[in-house]
């Protein structure tokens, strides 16, 4: 559960400022990926700094900074060895999850927020005066009620659903969770058959939330989390949709399959050997798609 839920907004103790806030992420973590994508799309790389942990969430302290691994950085703000150390630096008695993403205020030396959805919306709307693309609105107000409902469905059954499958404590729990996951994927497959994006013809936050899970599914969840009923590439609409999103440069840049595979296969609680599978080939992600022809008459 996310425990830091402060909001960056004018008139608060956390006003939007350039070069004040710092984002901590893992390239393995799909929730981190969502914030990373919004930061890229809005053009906030020079406004909100970012540090990247190593690919594995260790059982003895969570995400560690491993700058010797390609794609990782040191902790550029607090000079800590791990994400856990940042939480304890802010609150020595903290006993919650040492999770990422983590949005940090360098001026006050404290954590602003560690809830991915709220960080996404702050990056989308609160830094427009500094953004390269201030007119891009990934969460249009008139779509938020329907989008929030869809986001909850996708999170409960797909985004977090894959974790429910992988960490199921027994067979009955797994059977229930795997049914919920693939029933939900069937629902989204049907939706995307007639709708180019999740909210019609406009690319939104909802697509950014779903994309990291789909991008990780065939490479990691299918194997490590026992989500092997069907691959995403076996769904006509979902695979076509994933290709379009993956071929968007800013979204493709957020995907690091070396980190993703090392992270999930290296999780001792689900893969004690730590052996990383060589496959699968994901060449289909670069194949042509025809999403521009889907749902041309939907709003």
Image (tube, rainbow, N blue to C red):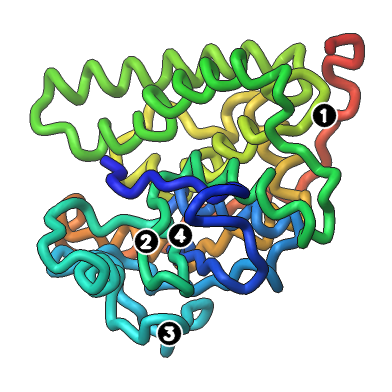
Direction bottom: furthest residue = 68
- Residue that badge 4 annotates: 103
Q: Earlier in the sequence, mark 4 or mark 3?
A: 3
The residue located at (26%, 32%) in the rendering is 164
Q: Tell me where residue 64 appears, x and y as whole percent.
A: 30, 75
Q: Give the image quarter of residue 163.
A: top left
Q: Could you tell me how many numbered marks the image carries? A: 4
Assess whether mark 3 and mark 4 are in contact (beta carbons under 8 angstroms). Answer: no
Front residue (pair 235, 149): 149
Relative image position of residue 99 (x, y in whole percent): 31, 56
Asked if marks 1 and 4 touch (Cβ < 8 Å), the reply is no
Query: Sequence-wise, which precedes: disc 1 or disc 3?
Result: 3
**Which residue occupies 76% across, 52% down?**
128
Residue 141, by quadrant, is top right
Given this view, does label 1 or label 3 mark the residue nearer the observer? 3
* Residue picked out by circle 1: 291
Mark 1–mark 2 distance (CA, rounded to whole Å): 40 Å
Is residue 126 placed above or below 43 in the rendered structure? Answer: above
Q: Which residue is mark 2?
A: 111
């Amino acid at each position: 559960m996310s425990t830091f839920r402060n909001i960056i907004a004018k008139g608060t103790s956390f006003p939007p400022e350039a070069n004040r806030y710092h984002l901590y992420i893992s390239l393995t973590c799909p929730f981190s990926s969502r914030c990373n994508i919004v930061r890229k799309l809005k053009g906030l790389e020079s406004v909100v700094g970012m540090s990247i942990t190593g690919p594995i969430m260790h059982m003895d302290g969570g995400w560690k900074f491993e700058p010797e691994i390609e794609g990782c950085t040191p902790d550029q703000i607090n000079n800590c060895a791990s994400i856990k150390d940042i939480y304890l630096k802010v609150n020595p008695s903290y006993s919650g999850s040492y999770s990422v993403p983590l949005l940090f205020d360098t001026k006050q030396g404290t954590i602003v927020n560690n809830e991915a959805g709220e960080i996404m919306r702050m990056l989308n709307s609160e830094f427009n005066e500094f953004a390269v693309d201030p007119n891009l609105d990934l969460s249009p107000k008139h779509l938020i009620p329907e989008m929030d409902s869809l986001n909850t469905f996708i999170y409960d059954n797909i985004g977090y659903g894959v974790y429910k499958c992988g960490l199921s404590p027994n067979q009955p729990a797994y059977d229930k969770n795997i049914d919920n996951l693939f029933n939900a994927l069937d629902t989204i497959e049907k939706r995307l058959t007639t709708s180019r994006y999740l909210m019609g013809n406009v690319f939104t936050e909802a697509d950014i939330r779903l994309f990291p899970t789909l991008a990780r599914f065939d490479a990691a969840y299918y194997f490590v989390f026992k989500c092997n009923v069907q691959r995403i590439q076996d769904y006509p609409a979902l695979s076509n949709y994933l290709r379009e999103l993956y071929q968007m440069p800013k979204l493709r840049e957020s995907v690091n399959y070396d980190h993703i595979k090392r992270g999930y296969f290296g999780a001792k609680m689900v893969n004690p050997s730590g052996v990383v599978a060589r496959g699968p080939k994901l060449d289909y992600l670069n194949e042509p798609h025809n999403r521009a022809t889907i749902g041309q008459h939907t709003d």
